């Protein structure tokens, strides 16, 4: 049966969310930036004016300002991006319960069973209008019979446009496009393909399947299938992110904690285990929470939203200590402490996502270089390429150590 799949991509998502509260920023070149005090002084997103002035995602703020002296800088508000992402998703779920997020600003929606005899293009236009009216955001929508072409469609015309790619027209629309426009064709693959004179998606489709398999392995086979419109992968309703509420760990120390140095050691080891579990489940925490119980068993809880979500031992530890130093007055010694990350998002989400998705299209080699620089500066793996990321399929949790572990709940953490 022919499927009806939408891919909905929010345009300039982080920048657009910032402009909801500050519409005056629409008229000036504006960029969402990392926190310069924390050595994250890079451009995370920009609006159309800044884009036209040559401002690029992932470049250093000072580089952007050289090209665009009047650039208005806005600090990222990650909690807002997560919040609107959840609200948007709720809206899409009115159309189908099969909604698969891809980062914070993109998702696939499978309307095969729900669209009835409505015209898919009209429904896509309705969604765009509602996103505009109800959120003051814009999105582009790709409508197609498989996920790969739907994704391509949302990229084909933007901002705020619908592109319909059908079994009848895909040869005209898709085949002339460069091979690198296809999801999963990164810079390295594109240049290997160019070596054998495969430059467009049409070239890929027309190449011998056996040759591609020999030349690129399994992914060669996959690309041939994609290029010919034969992708049949399902839209997975991933309840995964909302099922997980938090990952944490806590400990009751053998002897009461008497001083800051002891507290520091305990927080450091707890933060390490929490970060390791986040990485294991390919998640990032947006909020760090600590619990402190004194020897009279009074409990104190404090939390802080992070500047950007993390799975780093160091960031979690430093935030935990910051919270501890701000809040604990040492009126008595401490019996137990806990560290927890909440507001979890997939590590494919958000900032990392927006960096590599643009890098992966090979549109900007400087961006790829910038990512390498970021990795050098902040540790390898800070920004990952698509090929390094596995699907989030690990549902096998082990709430092992102490009384920590993972809390599950049906409540939408975005709400
Ligand atoms: Mg987008």
Image: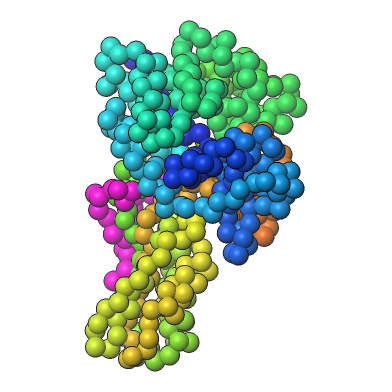
- Pinpoint residue 133: horizontal percent, then vertical percent: 37, 30
Name the dominant secondary structure of the magenta segment.
loop
Q: Classify 24 as above or below 41.
A: above
Is 90 situated left or right of 314 in this image? left
Question: Farthest top residue?
Answer: 168
Q: Does the magenta stretch include residue 382?
A: no
Quadrant of res 147: top left
Residue at the image point whose x is 32% and y is 68% from the top: 404
Q: Classify 194 as above or below 415.
A: above
Q: Does the magenta stretch include residue 401?
A: yes
| Residue 250 or residue 306, whichever sits in front | 306
- Pinpoint residue 73: horizontal percent, then vertical percent: 59, 50
Quadrant of res 41: bottom right
Residue at the image point whose x is 66% and y is 34% from the top: 52
Is 298 situated left or right of 6 in this image? left
Is 189 situated left or right of 282 in this image? right
- Pinpoint residue 87: horizontal percent, then vertical percent: 34, 41
Q: Classify 115 as above or below 51.
A: above
Residue extent of the magenta highlight: 392-415
How many numbered markers are drawn?
Answer: 0
Q: Is residue 213 visible?
A: no
| Residue 311 or residue 117, whichever sits in front | 117
| Residue 174 or residue 228, whichever sits in front | 174
Residue at the image point whose x is 43% and y is 57% from the top: 286
Residue at the image point whose x is 31% and y is 51% from the top: 413
Q: Classify 396 as above or below 293.
A: above
Query: How are the colours assigned in the image?
Result: rainbow
Q: Is residue 113 visible?
A: yes
């Amino acid at each position: 049966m022919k499927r009806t799949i939408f891919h909905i991509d929010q345009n300039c998502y982080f920048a657009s969310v910032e402009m909801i509260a500050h519409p005056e920023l629409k008229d000036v070149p504006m960029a969402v930036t990392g926190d310069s005090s924390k050595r994250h002084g890079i451009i995370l997103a920009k609006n159309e004016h800044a884009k036209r002035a040559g401002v690029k995602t992932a470049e250093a703020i000072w580089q952007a300002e050289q090209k665009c002296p009047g650039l208005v800088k806005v600090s990222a508000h990650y909690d807002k991006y997560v919040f609107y992402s959840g609200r948007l998703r709720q809206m899409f779920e009115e159309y189908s319960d099969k909604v698969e997020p891809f980062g914070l600003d993109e998702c696939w929606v499978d309307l095969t069973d729900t669209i009835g005899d409505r015209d898919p293009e009209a429904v896509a236009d309705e969604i765009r209008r509602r996103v505009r009216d109800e959120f003051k955001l814009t999105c582009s929508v790709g409508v197609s019979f498989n996920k790969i072409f739907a994704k391509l469609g949302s990229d084909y015309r933007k901002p705020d446009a619908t592109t319909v790619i059908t079994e009848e027209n895909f040869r005209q629309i898709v085949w002339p496009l460069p091979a690198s426009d296809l999801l999963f064709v990164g810079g390295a693959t594109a240049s290997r393909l160019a070596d054998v004179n495969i430059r467009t998606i049409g070239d890929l489709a027309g190449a011998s399947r056996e040759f591609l398999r020999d030349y690129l392995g399994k992914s060669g086979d996959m690309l041939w299938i994609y290029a010919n419109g034969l992708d049949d992968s399902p839209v997975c309703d991933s309840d995964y992110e909302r099922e997980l509420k938090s990952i944490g760990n806590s400990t009751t120390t053998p002897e009461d904690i008497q001083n800051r140095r002891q507290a520091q050691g305990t927080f450091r080891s707890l933060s390490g285990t929490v970060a390791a579990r986040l990485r294991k489940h390919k998640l990032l925490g947006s909020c760090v929470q600590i619990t402190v119980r004194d020897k009279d068993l009074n409990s104190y809880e404090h939390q802080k939203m992070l500047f950007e979500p993390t799975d780093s031992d160091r960031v979690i530890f430093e935030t935990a200590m910051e919270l501890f130093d701000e809040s604990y007055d040492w009126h008595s010694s401490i019996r137990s402490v806990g560290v927890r990350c909440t507001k979890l998002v997939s590590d494919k989400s958000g900032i990392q996502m927006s960096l590599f998705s643009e890098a992966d299209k090979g549109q900007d080699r400087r961006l790829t270089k910038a990512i390498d620089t970021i990795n050098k500066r902040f540790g390898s793996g800070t920004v990952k390429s698509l090929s390094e990321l596995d699907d989030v399929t690990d549902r096998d949790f082990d709430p092992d150590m102490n009384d920590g572990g993972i809390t599950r709940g049906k409540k939408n953490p975005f709400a």
